[in-house]
Amino acid sequence: MPKNSAVARVGRDAISETLGREIVDGALSPGTVLTLESLQQRFGVSRTVARDSVKVLESHGLLYSKRRVGLVVTGTEHWSVFAPAVIAWRLASRHARTAFIELTQLRIAVETEAVAMAALRRTEDQARRLLDLAASMRRLGETEEVEEFMRADVAFHRLLLAAGANSMFAALAEVVTEVLTGRAQHGLMPTRPMPEALDAHEGVARAIADQDPEAARRQMEILVDEVRSALEQ
Amino acid sequence: MPKNSAVARVGRDAISETLGREIVDGALSPGTVLTLESLQQRFGVSRTVARDSVKVLESHGLLYSKRRVGLVVTGTEHWSVFAPAVIAWRLASRHARTAFIELTQLRIAVETEAVAMAALRRTEDQARRLLDLAASMRRLGETEEVEEFMRADVAFHRLLLAAGANSMFAALAEVVTEVLTGRAQHGLMPTRPMPEALDAHEGVARAIADQDPEAARRQMEILVDEVRSALEQ
DNA sequence: TATAGCCAAAGGTGTCATGTTTGCACCATC
DNA sequence: GATGGTGCAAACATGACACCTTTGGCTATA
């Protein structure tokens, strides 16, 4: 049994990974038909592995398989755009900018609601940690320790989502992290955090500690408006 | 070769369907270990089919497979709670109420943002159809044609999401449909639509037609506040 | 005697090759 | 146009290894 054939052998994950990327990127356009056979050839794997890879792509809606036809690549409207894998592929594709903007809008929508929920449901511990993080952000922002600042920022927003006591909000933690860390690359963040933003973060934390959902929402609105305006252009 | 064994044979989809339900419902609690062999036994299928089913559950994060151990069921925090299949399973589980509330909160969050986007991006046609639907809703609401009213309501909200020009918002169309049609079962809807709600729907449609994002947001806020208060208790 | 460390066997998934069945698109024929 | 045959490609089945990792027993040592 040949341990290595002429074709580069490649693991199961790598196959769905590669194909996922290609579909999301548009290299494989909707309507394109593949066959298991062609995948076996291309990646030098057995039918089992090819089938496995197809299964995961299918469960993400990137293609569907049809007897007598093959594997049909589908368009955006059928994709599971919330699946972490799909998000990652979109962000690595030529449509990264669009994906990033959409994710940012989603973040804005969810966080605005999450703060209000958090104000009602937060634990004592969560309230304290939010205040701490907001304080850290001010300190790190003023001394321009950007790396550390971003870490605190991410922690703050993740905690916010967790405190919202909604598993669907919480599931977006990765998205928020991605958006916050990606802002720099997309030129959507001032190199130095604006004082208003720092105030607003503290305001949000305080409102949540005070269990005042309306105030929390107002403070978050300030934060978010900044992002919205950065999004225009 | 036995065409029919003693065990009831069952298709691939039905297996992941059944297991998905059981995991989400809690009948199979996190940490539970299954084996491919046990699935083959239970459903009377070959290893190929068992593996296929496991692949889709795995891609939704409901379990993971580990050599020498088996198939380990995971907890909520690992599930793809945005996957349509998972949403459906949750809504059919004993935790339906929680799931429903979480989905409603998500809908509120996204729609509030979507209207503003829609006001900026809507096409002429979309604007007209929104106005039409709002008018229909008033008519059907006042004559208490509940069935038809709900259909128009769903169409209105789906169109709203589509007009937001964000594929992640648009992907939530099914969720919104589910939430709107499910409201009745969960006692979250007045049998007769409130006049304020009808006004607000018209207000939203008009604001979008006028390309006034702030007004659209304000009107949607009215709609949404009603739902929020229904959610308390 | 108790404990730490090591090794070998067992038991599970991962992968492969091959064969059989089934649905269905296409085409020739009526 | 209906309609039936034909071949294609996926769906499903089976059996055989390869490979990893857990477990438990064995041995050496304190």
Image (cartoon, coloured by chain):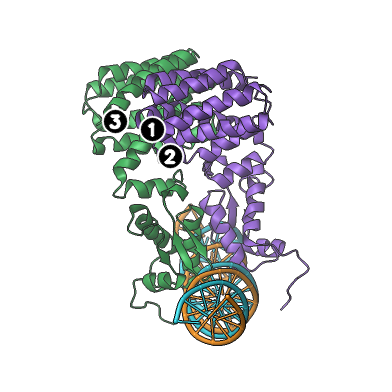
Chain colours: A purple, B green, C cyan, D orange
Front residue of B215 and B37:
B37
Residue visible at 25% across and 21% down in the picture:
B194
* Cβ–Cβ under 8 Å for marks 1 and 2: no
Q: Which residue is mark 3?
A: B231
Whole-number angstrom distance, CA of label 1 to CA of label 2: 22 Å
Which mark is in front, 3 or 1?
Answer: 1
**Mark sitting earlier along the chain (1/2):** 1
Could you classify mark 2 by the number of other residues whose Cα lies within 10 Å: few (under 14), some (14-19), or many (20 or more)?
A: many
The picture places residue D26, in percent across and down from the top left corner, at 54, 87
Displayed quadrant of residue A123: top left
Q: Is residue A153 left or right of residue A162?
A: right
Whole-number angstrom distance, CA of label 2 to CA of label 3: 16 Å
Marks counted in the figure total 3
Q: Which amino acid, by three-letter code, is at mark 3?
A: Leu
Q: Is residue A94 left or right of residue B195?
A: right
The picture places residue B126, in percent across and down from the top left corner, at 48, 23
Q: Which amino acid, by three-letter code, is at mark 2?
A: Met
User: Both on one chain, marks 1 and 2?
Assistant: yes
Q: Which residue is mark 1?
A: A124
* Element marked by disc 3: helix
Could you classify mark 1 by the number of other residues whose Cα lies within 10 Å: few (under 14), some (14-19), or many (20 or more)?
A: few
The picture places residue A146, in percent across and down from the top left corner, at 67, 29
Q: Is residue B114 left or right of residue D29?
A: left
